[in-house]
């Protein structure tokens, strides 16, 4: 009996010691949970998550900038392939071999781009002497007007500025800039050749390449990846084709107005309008400013005002009537999103970044729209649509 009681007391003592030991181990956990579970702890958790995301995004952007000679040709080739994929598919459906159909479409793309470049070069060269003389007269008039202002620089200051420009042009810094320009040309040629090669293979074996990339995925992940690929090609193709159609109408309308107003370089200015129209929001404004400046130098203030009126009229007609029909759902982004995308793209990659930023943003939004199903957006996007406030 005594042994039994002694054994019982010993067991209870061991159990109490074990409870105490577990409590000592659990106490720091409860303390940590209490520290991170209150309002400030949740704020710290979210801040840490944001920092990690920002670091990862920064590393991704740095990597893309480092590999820009490769990444930019890949993106451009993908955009061109998506744009002209209906033509390639039509040729393949007519039993045209894949390599031959890719060559035909590739030659068509090169022909279109070459024709645009030739039109600009030909028109500028044909009217350059006249515009140069008018520009010199306009610049002389501008200097004369500046000299009438109370804060106008005197002749000595103008001479100093002129000498500074001459010194820079003959300095080693200018020479190093020229060498850097040669390096940029070499990078451009390398990227152009790479883009043409990639475009050929995308046109020839695009679906085969995509199926190869999907091999690691199974089940729902594979279905989602297939939806993302289809949506990317559809969005890029629809965006570029719709934008090109709108840009063509803008160029024709503004070009006719420039011809009627007898503005020099009407054809190259119309081509510039076409190219700048691929930059949403700001492209039309830049084209209007350029056309107005040429009209101001060549024909005077009244012609410049009329050019601005033509640009505004054409863009209003295009934005209110033509763009909703041609673009459809290819680019359903808020103007603020477009502006932010343009800013980020311009900061990261200059003019090319401004051109590519909006279609890439449209692709990202398109992926969100099919993330959970063929016509089912991601859960957070569905919640935002149900609760717009």
Image (tube, rainbow, N blue to C red):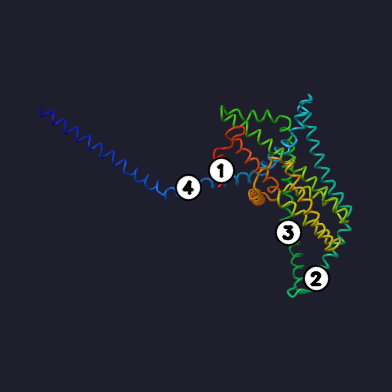
Split into 4 quadrants, where in the image is the N terminus?
A: top left
Q: Nearer the viewer, residue 117 or 162?
A: 117
Q: Nearer the viewer, residue 91 or 42?
A: 42
Badge 3 element: helix
Per the model, the C-alpha gap separating discs 1 and 2 is 56 Å
Q: Which residue is mark 3?
A: 174
Q: Residue at x 75, y 54 (%)?
A: 286
Q: Which residue is mark 4?
A: 46
- Is there any visible trace of residue 150 in the rendered image? yes
**Depth-wise, is mark 3 or mark 2 nearer the camera?**
2
Q: Which residue is mark 1?
A: 384
Q: For the residue carrying disc 3, how many other residues have a C-alpha within 10 Å: few (<14), some (14-19), or many (20+)?
A: few
Q: Residue at x 81, y 60 (%)?
A: 305
- Coordinates of residue 372 in the picture (x, y in percent): 57, 34
Badge 1 element: helix
Q: Please tell me whether residue 136 is drawn above or below residue 191 in the rendered image.
A: below
> Residue lying farthest top?
95
Badge 4 element: helix
- Is there any visible trace of residue 192 in the rendered image? no
Q: Is residue 40 left or right of residue 158?
A: left
Q: Earlier in the sequence, mark 1 or mark 3?
A: 3
Q: Earlier in the sequence, mark 4 or mark 1?
A: 4
- Coordinates of residue 302 in the picture (x, y in percent): 84, 62
Q: Earlier in the sequence, mark 3 or mark 2?
A: 2
> Residue lying farthest left?
2
């Amino acid at each position: 009996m005594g042994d039994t009681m002694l054994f019982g007391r010993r067991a209870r003592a061991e159990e109490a010691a074990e409870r105490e030991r577990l409590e000592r181990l659990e106490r720091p956990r409860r303390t940590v949970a209490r520290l991170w579970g209150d309002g400030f702890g949740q704020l710290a958790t979210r801040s840490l998550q944001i920092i990690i995301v920002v670091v990862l995004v920064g590393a991704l952007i740095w990597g893309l900038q480092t590999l820009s000679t490769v990444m930019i040709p890949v993106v451009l080739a993908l955009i061109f392939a998506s744009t002209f994929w209906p033509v390639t598919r039509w040729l393949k459906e007519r039993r045209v071999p894949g390599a031959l159909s890719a060559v035909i479409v590739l030659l068509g793309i090169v022909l279109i781009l070459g024709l645009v470049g030739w039109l600009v070069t030909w028109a500028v060269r044909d009217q350059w002497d006249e515009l140069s003389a008018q520009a010199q007269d306009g610049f002389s008039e501008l200097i004369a007007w500046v000299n009438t202002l109370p804060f106008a620089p005197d002749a000595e200051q103008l001479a100093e500025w002129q000498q500074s420009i001459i010194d820079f042009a003959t300095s080693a810094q200018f020479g190093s800039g020229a060498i850097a320009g040669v390096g940029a040309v070499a990078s451009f040629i390398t990227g152009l050749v790479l883009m043409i090669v990639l475009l050929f293979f995308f046109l020839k074996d695009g679906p085969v390449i995509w199926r190869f990339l999907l091999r690691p995925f199974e089940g729902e992940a594979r279905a989602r990846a297939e939806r993302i690929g289809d949506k990317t090609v559809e969005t890029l193709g629809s965006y570029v084709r719709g934008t090109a159609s709108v840009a063509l109408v803008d160029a024709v309308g503004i070009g006719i107005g420039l011809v009627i107003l007898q503005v020099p370089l009407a054809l190259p200015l119309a081509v510039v309008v076409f190219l700048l129209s691929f930059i949403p929001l700001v492209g039309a404004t830049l084209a209007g400013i350029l056309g107005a400046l040429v009209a101001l130098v060549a024909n005077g203030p009244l012609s410049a005002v009329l050019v601005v009126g033509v640009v505004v009229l054409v863009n209003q007609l295009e934005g209110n009537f033509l763009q909703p029909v041609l673009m459809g759902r290819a680019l359903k982004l808020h103007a603020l999103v477009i502006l932010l995308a343009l800013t980020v793209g311009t900061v990261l990659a200059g003019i090319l970044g401004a051109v590519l930023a909006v279609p890439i943003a449209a692709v990202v939004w398109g992926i969100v729209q099919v993330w959970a199903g063929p016509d089912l957006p991601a859960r957070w996007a569905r919640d935002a649509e149900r609760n717009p406030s």
